[in-house]
Image (spheres, coloured by chain):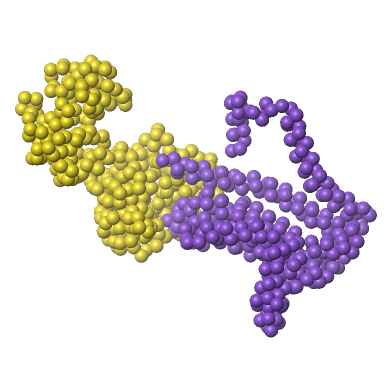
Chain colours: A yellow, B purple
Amino acid sequence: MSIELRNISKRFGDVAAVQNVSFKVAEGELVALLGPSGGGKTTVLRMIAGLEQPTEGDILIRGQRVNDVSVQKRNIGFVFQGYALFKTMSVADNIAFGLKIKKWPQAEINDRVAELLKLFGLDGLGKRFPHQLSGGQRQRVAIARSLAPKPSVLLLDEPFGAVDAKIRQELRDWLVHLHDELSVTTVFVTHDQEEAMEVSNRIVIFSRGNLEQIGAPQEVYERPSNEFVARFIGVLNVLELRVEHGVARLHELTFPNHGVAEGASLRIGFRPYTVQISPDLSEYRYRATLKHVYFLGVQLRLELETPSGLTLRTRITKDEFVRLGLAEDKEVSFQIREYRVLSRDGFDMSPEVSAVHQLPSIAENI
Amino acid sequence: MAGSTQKRWTSGHAKSRRGAEDPWYVRWILIVVSLGFAGIFLVLPLVNVFDQALAKGWQIAVGSLGDPDTMSAMKLTALVSAICVPLNTLFGIAAAWLIAKFEFPGKALLTTLIDLPFSVSPVVSGLLYVILFGLKGYFGPWLDRHDIQIIFAVPGIVLATIFVTFPFVARELIPLMQAQGSDQEQAALTLGATGWQTFWHVTLPSIKWGLLYGVILCTARAVGEFGAVSVVSGHITGITDTLPLRIEKLDKEYNSVAAFSIAALLAVLALLTLGLKTWLEHRQQRELDLAQTSSDSSDEH
């Protein structure tokens, strides 16, 4: 079912948890609500479920306004952060709960429970109690329970928060497959940008109750609409420059002034992968020492320190690292291939964030 | 949970085993003091109760319980408990639910009020009802005109007992329900359950051991209450005497076998309660542990 939020605001006393948020989720989509904690994303999810009432605005499910429809009648499946399994009931009874409430015939309940146990890889665990299950199993029971009454919308609050890193990866893959199979409209909340990027079709980014951007994972990564999004989705190097003699400068690094007046400041940001490095000290314009190398698997994260003490973060593949013969404490030359202007003279220049400025070569630069 | 902590303590950390390294006489002094104290003040009187009751043989002891006035006191105690315990159970669940799951102005005040009967002397609480409903009390004249008798009658005994046993169920349930939070209830709502269905199928099963524990304590106190009841009862033999009051009366009449026989009966009840209580405490701890493990996992991030 499609979901639509129109100008939704929510206040708890004097605290504005959500401010004038509007977005749509199309039928069958898998959407992530992403943001730091306290960003309002869980409140949005709970308002879609009917567990909270919006202070202002309308919520529509399949085009019908549901503000006045009680949580019981919205036909949603909700998976709670700590799973909230009924601990006095067996796994099978947990899954059957919603069906018993909806007065399904017992035979159909049994069939549905058996079907879900199988689908969720919980065969043989039907008689166990929640405290006898692993974290991953509990989570699957929670999802099975919420899907049992065939809800039109599945809502998950930090579904992967309470399990360890390895199982988290398995569960992510599994959720994607489950969604492909059932194609039920799914909205989940997460504070982990990697998780949001990997699992969802689209990401809705929240910060301090405001909707910052909505878009496909690649879109928000490559064209963040403001500095918050740029910094939240992936790593961003940020430099605070000052314009002197027509050039924006920070220590030895110089950039075009982008129309900023003499003596005023200019903030720029660039992704780690836009920093090119070479062991040949004459190849690129700037010098730096390779201060730290962090091994992340196929990729390495490098920390460069310029002679004046600036620290820049960059990424490089392991093969490239070996090919260039790099090592910790080695001196290298580097250049920044592209960057974005974040703000000019303290004013937020959001529209410019998405414009990428290229620095083609040393000679032409400045 | 306590077991695993203990294991960790005794296996590693030699330095944390200070207790075992104290000189032997410290241990022995502590053991003698605590056992001696318990022996003199708890075990000895208890043994004496049974000894006195059985002084003229068990037939006479049991026979004395069959006295019509004693039987009537038993019936009254049973009646009073049968009214007070269910009422306080209902109140306890309602108050615990309110305090554990909602935020409202006056919450701290209500929590304190629930403890009031613990801090007020039972005699004073009995007097409160005399002041309210006695002939010279606030409502006394009105009640008298309408021919309703509360003080020196069964209603007064019931009221005083309710007051004294008021905190037991609520006090047991509040920490339990607070630890469990309301996630399970919300999950039930999203699955279509009404408020009543949620309470019946989700809340009640998850608090049942704590609830039973509170009910047992409440019953024990309702059966044994003396001070408050003594003030409002009027001590009318065969009509407003409860078992504890009956004991006092028989003792004053120098009928020590009969007095101690009832005392022995109450003591047996108390020992049974103690046994039940210990077992329930164990079950309830498990309930609480479960609630905490589930909330721990959601606190992790």
Q: Is residue B215 left or right of residue A366?
A: right
Instruction: Report whether B167 appears left or right of B188.
Output: right
In the picture, the quarter occupied by the C terminus of chain A is top left
Which residue is painted at 55% across and 44% down in the image?
B290
At 87% across and 63% down in the image, what residue appears? B252
Q: How many marks?
A: 0
Q: Position of residue B155 (x, y in %)?
A: 70, 72
Q: Residue furthest front?
A: A263
Q: Estimate the x, y position of residue A303 in percent, counting from the top left.
A: 26, 25
Describe residue A134's horizontal placement relative to residue B39 as left or right. Answer: left
Is residue B86 visible in this depiction of the protein? no
In the rendered image, the vertical position of residue A238 relative to residue B187, given as above or below = above
Residue in the image at 73% along x and 31% along y: B27
Residue A283 in which image quadrant: top left
Q: Which residue is located at x 66 percent, y 81 percent? A: B142
Quick check: can you spot residue A312? yes
The residue sitting at the right extreme is B56
B290 vs A125, nearest the viewer? B290
- In the current view of this chain or complex, which residue is farthest to the left? A364
Q: Looking at this view, is A92 or B190 the one in front?
A: B190
Q: Position of residue B253 (x, y in %)?
A: 89, 64
Which corner quadrant of the image does residue B147 belong to?
A: bottom right
Of A149 and B239, the residue lying toward us? B239
Whole-percent x, y for residue A62 in the image: 29, 59
**Image quarter hosting the N terminus of chain A:** bottom left
